[in-house]
Image: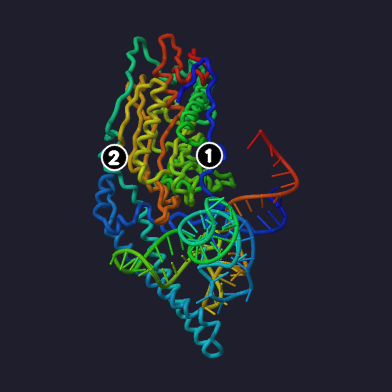
Amino acid sequence: MGVAHPDQPARIVPVRPGSFPVSLPRFSADRDGPGRGYHHGMIDITLLRERPDDLKASLARRGLDLDVDLMAQIDRDRRSTRANAESMRAEQKSLSRRIPRLEGEARQGAIAEAGKLAAGYRSALADADELDRRFRELWITVPNPAHPSAADGMVEEDAVEIKRWGTVRDFDFPVKDHRELGAELGMIDIERAARVSGSRFGYLTGPAVMIEFALVRMVLEMLGDRGFTPVVPPVLVREEALFGTGFFPDDDQQVYEVGVTAGEELRSDNLYLVGTSEVSLAAYHTGEVLEEDALPLRYAGFSSCFRREAGAHGKDTAGIFRVHQFDKVDMFSFCHPERSWDEHEMLLGIEEQIVQSLDIPYRVVNVAAGDLGSSAAKKYDIEAWIPSQERYREITSCSNTTDFQSRRLRIRYRTDGGNRLVHTLNGTAVAVGRLLIAIMENHQQADGSVVVPDALRAYAGFDRIG
RNA sequence: GGAGAGGUGGCCGAGCGGUCGAAGGCGCUCGCCUGCUAAGCGAGUAGGGGGUAACCCCCCCUCGAGGGUUCAAAUCCCUCCCUCUCCGCCA
């Protein structure tokens, strides 16, 4: 896309008006609790049944020690138990269907007999339900198998660098960090935020706000050209959306739950603040069957994001690098499974294009299998050079979650051979706080000002801060 | 927050406790017919799970969700969720 020149107004990109690509089912948020129906598997259950050794290998790559043989055994038990219950049910039903045509004693006898069958069925069904519950408890902990091309290793440091771009500036003056710059230039106020909200909060002020909206505007236009529909989604969601995206049950410590004070207690509203619009965007098509030729469906979601940052005590305590609340534009794609790996590369390409247009040196890393989180099969992070820290720090993340989320959320596409699960992918277009840091620190000048990157000037309305 | 009305297949919309997974219509698919199109005629057309090497086929579950009554529930009872209308409050 052509970025507007400073002397031209930013161009307006039309987005497909009213072209909603699928028919909407009647909304029913409570249809199927998590883990019911065929999706009681979190990953494809045929992996357990037909290739248990592959499953074991997959878990080993992620450094997980789960009892695959026990899972397989319980799976067999639950199926045979349910088959047994169902045959009783079939007998009971066929007898019940004959009852209306019977008279007198024959009728009474049949009713008594059917009653016995019904009781037997109830008992067998309870056994099957119990086995299902036990199976699910184990199966729910199985993460998405890592893609063969995902890097080996267990922790952040095991990520493999696959690319570097840009030239790290050689500063001939003392470099200031974003906190100092932000305070001096009237862009970031941490101290007052601490008084108002506590640690890990910030006020963005003045030019920072204009830069934020310039960034958002710039990428929404860029993404509009690529077929992304802009979305401002809900930031409060139900548990189902968090479960469906894989944040529950694993990362529930990172999520704020909201409620209302009731005496000494907090009464939950059963709503949770999203840590990323990925959650609300993924859940957007929950339970739907999409048309195959409508794929990929791409969305660009702008939202505030909320994270408790539990377990991050002492990490990145200065400034706004790691805060409880920040704004972000996220890309999300519902994609044909055969094209999701191309889509993944494309999302990364867009992320790079954005960072490049801002003239920020960065590197791309392939995240290690053991550090992927439960939903991603492969993940790229872009790490921008942060001069004050003299190292690369994560500013975007881009994952192919294959069918992990779509299985949980029951999002499929229609084919002649039946309905199949779509693949879902997500990637950060702009994480405002961190990108702001990268811009400020990389483009700071000896006189304490910050030069606005060319691409952003038309959107920001100024070319220098300070 | 108060009062009321509703949630049935891709969509609309019927449905006395007893072959109802569900009439009818629309849409879609495939045939036939037609100079082309339109119209007309015929057939098909929900999802999930299990049995089977697989197909045919068979069985179970699903009428917002969960539970209950009954030999038998879309239909009766309870709880919850959601949508809509009116009132109140509100950016």
Give the alpha-carbon distance from disc 1 to disc 2, as whole Å: 31 Å
- Given residues A4 and A198, the one toward you in this image is A4
Tag 1 secondary structure: loop
Kindly identify the amino acid type of the residue bearing the numbered disc 2.
Answer: Ala
**What residue is shown at x 29% (from left), y 41% (from top)?**
A369
Residue A63: percent from left, percent from top = 27, 45
Badge 1 vs badge 2, beta-carbon distance below 8 Å: no
Return the residue at label 1. Answer: A233
The numbered mark 1 sits on a residue in which chain?
A
Tag 2 secondary structure: loop
Kindly identify the amino acid type of the residue bearing the numbered disc 1.
Answer: Pro
**What residue is shown at x 51% (from left), y 40% (from top)?**
A273
Q: Residue furthest bottom?
A: A105
Left or right? Give the position of A69 relative to A39: left
**What residue is shown at x 43% (from left), y 69% (from top)?**
A126
Query: Which mark, residue A150?
Result: 2
Tag 2: Cα neighbours inside 10 Å, few (<14), some, or many (≥20)? many
User: Which of the 4 quarters of the picture holds residue A120?
Assistant: bottom left
Left or right? Give the position of A55 relative to A258: left
The numbered mark 2 sits on a residue in which chain?
A
User: Which of the 4 quarters of the picture holds residue A436?
Assistant: top left
Left or right? Give the position of A20 relative to A445: right
